[in-house]
Image (tube, rainbow, N blue to C red):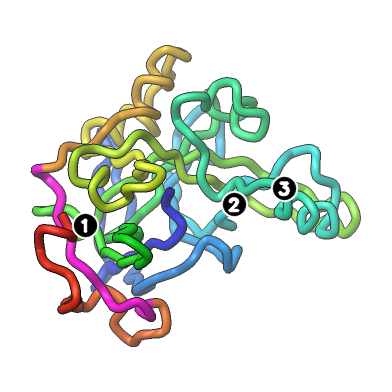
Amino acid sequence: MCYVIGVKVPKKQTLKIGNKHIDIEAIDIPAQSGFSYSKWPVLFYSDESKSTLEAGLMHWELIPHWVSNEKELNESRKKYTTLNIKGENILSNKVAGPFIIKKRCLVLASHFFEWQQIEKEKIPHCISLQEQNLFYIAGVWNIWTNRQTGDIIPSFGIITTEANEMMSKIHNTKKRMPTILDDDLAAQWINSNLSEKEVNSLAIHQFKTDKMKSHTVAKNFQQSNDPSAPFNYQLFTSQSLF
């Protein structure tokens, strides 16, 4: 799955999504675990007319609409997670299904992390794109209201798909990867009035291996000042890693 991601935007810049332009501020989040239940930068439309594309921080975890308060939310986390949502059954998913047609978003990322199982060891890898420092992951969002406190929280979940050839070798236990969209598909995902068939097709889109790259990182990378720094595992051969 995709539970640790990073994003780096060195300076304020303008992104072009289809025929829309959106300014984003400088961002530097080297690595963030979804299980910190923190905020993450996403692009979205807050109105159904889709007149103004917005960039903002949302709570990473699509909060189930039937949850009433923080206590119920904490209890639900013991049973399941909505940090990631499988693209294959996105339309029938009880949490995401009611919102996927109207409330899709783009999750900003520069890299993500995944673990490779080699015998009894779990080796973390940093995965990014060959020619892009910033890319888009398909997401779904909604606004949740804490009915006990009245707090209003926009929240989102990352959509995942089956692993491509490279990711199958890295994430070799569950063989999943985030649904990464190139610029054209990202514009379709967020701008278009898509049919259910089109939503399903994009949700399971598999980004090509030859456009991606990866390297191993230290096991304690999440505590490092530079989480994506390459780390060489001498006890394994290159053949065993791939």
Q: Nearer the viewer, residue 179 or 78?
A: 78
Are discs 3 and 2 less than 8 Å apart at CB?
Answer: no
**Which amino acid lies under the numbered mark 3 shown in the image of this protein?**
Lys
First in sequence: mark 3 vs mark 2:
2
* Disc 2 secondary structure class: loop
* Disc 3 secondary structure class: loop
Mark yes or no: residue 98 visible: yes
Residue 79 badge? 3
Q: Residues within 10 Å of mark 3 (few under 14, many from 20)?
A: few
Residue under pointer 1: 128
* Residue 198 position within the rendered picture, expressed as x and y whole percent measured from the top left: 38, 16
First in sequence: mark 1 vs mark 2:
2
Judged left or right of residue 239, residue 168 is right
Q: Nearer the viewer, mark 3 or mark 1?
A: 3
Is 84 colored magenta in this rendering?
no
The residue segment tinted magenta is 210-221
Q: Nearer the viewer, residue 27 or 162?
A: 162
Q: CA distance from mark 1 to mark 2?
A: 22 Å
Q: Residue at x 17, y 70 (%)?
A: 236
Q: Residue at x 45, y 39 (%)?
A: 159
Residue 185 badge? none
Judged left or right of residue 202, residue 86 is right
Q: How many marks?
A: 3
First in sequence: mark 3 vs mark 1:
3
Residue under pointer 2: 61
Judged left or right of residue 108, residue 84 is right
- In this rendering, the answer to whether 190 lies above or below 115 is above
Q: Nearer the viewer, mark 3 or mark 2?
A: 3
Q: Quadrant of residue 64?
A: top right
- In this rendering, the answer to whether 193 lies above or below 229 is above
